[in-house]
Image (cartoon, rainbow, N blue to C red):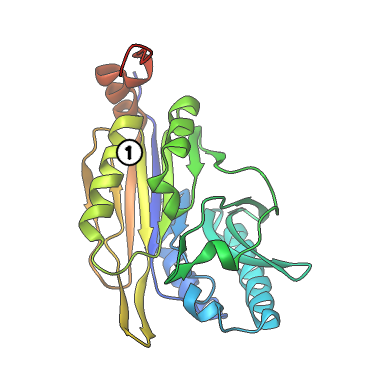
Amino acid sequence: MENRVLTVAALQLPSLPIEKAKLDYYLAIAKSKKVSLILLAEYVTNLFFKELEKTPLGLIEDQAQKQKENLLKLSKIYNITIVSPLVWVEKKKIFKLMAVFDKGSFKAYEQRALMPYSHWNEKGFFDEGYCHKTPGFITVDGFKIAVVGGFELHLDAFWQKMREKKADLVLLPTASTFESKNRWRELTKTRAFLGGSYVLRANRVGEFEAKDGKWSFYGDSFVVNPFGEIESSLGSNEEILIAEISKKDITEARRVWSFNKISLSLGDMQ
């Protein structure tokens, strides 16, 4: 059987300036490596969440509009699908979206599971109801790809949907900080293994100066294969990761483990 391969990339960046020179640079590298899809981390096209909380609505809207225009143009120029979280303003409401820029076209899926914690309360900040299509699925070069928000890694319902839909690749953009590196690695490896799919994680880098200390975004973007193994990863600096997604490996992992074919009745369990 011929092994089809999809070449993808994860960009590990801090918040981007409005001008598109930096993205131009990395997209040119991706194009030279025959990349079909590139993933950006959370809070890269916008300010970090804790900064957004103190930013006037008009400035958030202006930044979002300009970054959307930039990404639309770049996806068309380089003929690459760009997937990026995007903080979006419409009718004075603020939404957290997963945006897909596909060679000049645009569609978005709303992140439905938002962090509810006192130190990072996205649920209390963002509005809901922009659209009802998450987790979203796109197709690139014959590969079925799921688009989810980073926090949704923790919720079983989303990953049950990945298995049901037989996603070949799950895109996982994050803005992970504190001492969570090992936890994110282990959770992601488990999800990939149980789902028989690749997971591409793009994490933010940079720092945020809070009143109680510095928040450091540690990078560690990586790709996990369907056997639950990290195939390649980045360090803590601004970088690009380029990886190949193999149909043969996806098929083999699902054949060997067949988790989706195992039925279990829990009716008699106490």
- Looking at the picture, tell me which residue is in the foreground, 238 or 103: 238
- Residue that protrudes farthest toward the front in the picture: 270
At 35% from the left edge and 77% from the top edge, which residue is drawn? Answer: 206
At 36% from the left edge and 48% from the top edge, which residue is drawn? Answer: 200
Q: Is residue 59 left or right of residue 212?
A: right
The residue carrying mark 1 is: 191
**Residue 189: % across, % down:** 26, 42
Q: Is residue 71 above or below residue 147?
A: below
Q: Is residue 158 left or right of residue 104?
A: left
**Residue 186: % across, % down:** 23, 47
- Residue that protrudes farthest toward the right in the picture: 91
Which quadrant: the N terminus?
Answer: top left
Which quadrant: the C terminus?
Answer: top left
Q: Is residue 240 above or below residue 229?
A: below
Q: Amino acid at mark 1?
A: Arg
At 54% from the left edge and 42% from the top edge, which residue is drawn? Answer: 135
Q: Which picture quadrant has residue 117?
A: bottom left
Kind of element beneath mark 1: helix
